[in-house]
Image (cartoon, rainbow, N blue to C red):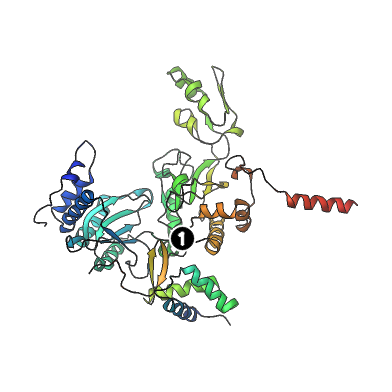
Amino acid sequence: MAKTPEEIADAMHKMVKDAFGVKKYKPMDLNKAMRELFGDEVDKKTCKEAIKLLVNSGRCVYTYFGGSFLEIPHREGAAND
Amino acid sequence: MADKLPNTPKLDELEKGKWPSFVKEIKMAAKKSPMCADLLGQLEKSYTEKVGYWKHGGIVGVMGYGGGVIGRYSALPKEFPNVSHFHTMRVNQPAGWYYNTEALRKICDIWEKHGSGITNLHGSTGDLVLLGTRTEELEPIFDELQKINFDIGGSGSDVRTPSCCCGQSRCEWACYDTMAACHDFTMEYQDELHRPAFPYKFKFKFSGCPNDCVASIARSDMSLIGTWRDSIQQDDAEVKAYVDGGLDIEEDVISRCPGKCMAWDGKKLEIDNSFCRRCMHCINVMPKALRPGKDRGATILLGSKAPIVEGALLSSVLIPFIKMEAPYQELKDIIERIWDVWSEEGKNRERVGEFIQRVGMGNFLEAIEVEPVAEMVAHPRENPYIFYEEFFEEDDDEEGDKG
């Protein structure tokens, strides 16, 4: 049965949260991981929707360090008060 | 208002001479903006100590977007507190960079209220660049820009803000409506522009003719350059008028034709259009006598980039000729396939041109389901070790059938 964008968003969020401070994931890394995890139950379009949900809700943010990544919101090291 | 401008002997040197000076402009802005006064102070210190005192911020932005804001912090926030945050915002420019003064005034009002007041028209991608603001001002600026129908542009691993030449709005050589195409693609790819999902950046630039005024062949991953596929339009009387007027047609036109497709017998210019490279040189020299043909469209090229991670590349031909008519569906289908392959297989920070070099043009074309054609060959082959396995296999099969 096809996974909903919400279910995929939760799985992506867990993956990003678990890797926080250790590894940064690009959106495509998450898409690939979801396809590996759920097989035919997900497609690229639903993964895209899931990322949109994560970012629009503020659970994840886009960051840029040479390339663009999805991370848990945090105070970056370079930031000044 | 800044109390007093810092002492800047090194920067002052850059005000000398007859050219415009960014120092002069920042000093003018500093009379109103303490941020600009501290910017001068930090720049002077950088010039003196030969150290760039900026830190790159990677997380600032507006809600929901992954591009359009480039985070910047001072490494000396105590010494220069007004530039402790100095983020850049890229604003998506109108197609062809047409503004009326009312629009520019509104943008400047927003920027003076929420930022440093200094701008850069335009950045190398084409965006209108607003230089220097604080993190807490980003959302209010974004809201106010939306109210006057402006949006922020691209940054990071996304579709960068598409840009185009002024096209048919002012230029008689434009072979398609670049502004319409640029606007259409900008609207079509809003999601890709604001939500970075690629291995690295992807730029579109639309040039109306091979003069390529936006340098798309050198500066965009996908270059859409206007061209024609019939014959150059020719007015023999005007050709003769140029020659009678003193033009050295042999030296200035015929000898410079890269296709060597022209001949002049003293009375008439003969053009063998089958060898024409569509370089525009002859047309540029004799604009009253020659014009692009009537069957017009664009050549689509892929893969150029400036040197960042690796060296510079020029785009090479992907589609020799395509009619550029809305909704451009055939082209958009190919773009989707390119993105699919590149996103799946591309490495982090690998531009599409580098990706093609890595996997090979043959494999790339097969993956995006485009048939190879002779126009895709950029230059004679460098590698003599070409294998014709498929050919031999087919040949063997045929031999076997005969046997």
Residue located 43% across and 49% down the image: B307
Q: Nearer the viewer, residue A27 or B338?
A: A27
Q: Secondary structure at mark 1?
A: helix
Question: Total number of numbered labels?
Answer: 1
Say which of B320 and B77 sits in front.
Answer: B77
Query: Residue B136: image x %, image y %?
Result: 24, 68
Query: Which amino acid type is marked by label 1?
Result: Glu
User: Is B40 on the left-hand or right-hand side of B271?
Assistant: left
Residue B295, percent from left and from top: 55, 41
Indicate the chain on which mark 1 is placed: B
Q: Is residue B372 visible?
A: yes
Q: Which residue is mark 1?
A: B188
Residue found at the far front of this picture: B49
- Residue B36 place in picture, x, y as percent: 18, 55
- In the image, B281: left or right of A63? right
Q: Is residue A81 left or right of residue A59?
A: left
- Determine the residue positioned at 57% across, 31% down: B259
List x then y, in percent, for residue B392: 77, 50
| As drawn, B396 above or below B239 | below
Q: Assess disc 1: are there few (<14), some (14-19) or many (≥20) residues with their C-alpha within 10 Å of its C-alpha.
A: few
Rendered residue at 44%/20% (across/down): B247
